[in-house]
Image: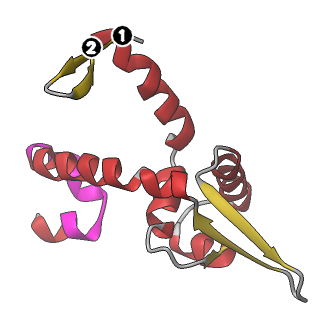
């Protein structure tokens, strides 16, 4: 991957961005992974049932699959406690926390541009109140 160094900062050129972007999308892409990451961003251990309750419309299979994929990618840590009933909690790893800053930048970009789109009102309560 070729990089340019300008003012002591590495920058990627054109097509060289594709590989890291594809990797990122593979890791966090999909309907449920980003919402899961955002829920875990508080740093508090979160139980499976709490995540399920907050993600309206997610099936057990999709939530379980998304959590497993995030765990395999090193984004999420799964802690299982030997209790009856069993308790499982999820937190972000250091690698998972490292993606929060770029996500904030993406959110800022989206907030700045979504006003141009009439369809943005479907996404969240904040959008609904801006209508």
Principal SS element in the magenta part? Answer: helix
Question: Is residue 122 magenta-colored?
Answer: yes
Quadrant position of residue 89: bottom right
Image position, residue 77 (x, y; %) = 66, 62
Q: Is 118 placed left or right of 33 in the picture?
A: left
Q: Is 56 placed left or right of 15 in the picture?
A: right
Image position, residue 97 (x, y; %) = 46, 58
Classify 10 Å Cα crowding around label 1: few (below 14), some (14-19), many (20 and above). few
When the figure is inspected, residue 26 is found, relative to residue 11, above or below; the finding is below
Helix, strand or loop under label 2: loop
Answer whether labels 2 and 1 touch (C-beta < 8 Å).
yes
Image position, residue 24 (x, y; %) = 47, 35
Q: Is 129 placed left or right of 51 in the picture?
A: left
Going 19% across and 52% down the picture, which residue do you hit? 108
Residue 32 visible, this angle: no
Quadrant position of residue 61: bottom right
Residue found farthest to the bottom: 84
Task: Tell which of 97 and 115 is nearer to you.
Answer: 97
- Range of magenta residues: 116-127
**Of callouts 2 and 1, the N-terminal one:** 1
Going 20% across and 28% down the picture, which residue do you hit? 8
Task: Tell which of 53 and 22 is nearer to you.
Answer: 22
Going 58% across and 71% down the picture, which residue do you hit? 51
Question: Is residue 51 magenta-colored?
Answer: no
Q: Quadrant of the N terminus?
A: top left
Circle on res. 13: 2
Helix, strand or loop under label 1: loop
Return the residue at label 1.
Answer: 2
């Amino acid at each position: 991957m070729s990089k340019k160094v300008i003012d002591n900062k590495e920058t990627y050129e054109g097509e060289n961005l594709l590989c890291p972007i594809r990797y990122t999308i593979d890791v966090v892409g999909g309907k449920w992974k980003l919402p899961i990451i955002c829920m875990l961003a508080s740093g508090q251990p979160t139980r499976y049932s709490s995540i399920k309750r907050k993600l309206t419309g997610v099936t057990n299979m999709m939530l379980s699959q998304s959590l497993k994929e995030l765990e395999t990618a090193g984004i999420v840590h799964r802690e299982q406690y030997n209790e009856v009933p069993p308790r499982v909690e999820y937190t972000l790893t250091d690698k998972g926390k490292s993606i929060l800053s770029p996500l904030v930048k993406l959110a800022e970009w989206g907030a700045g541009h979504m006003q141009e789109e009439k369809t943005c009102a479907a996404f969240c309560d904040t959008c609904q109140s801006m209508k």
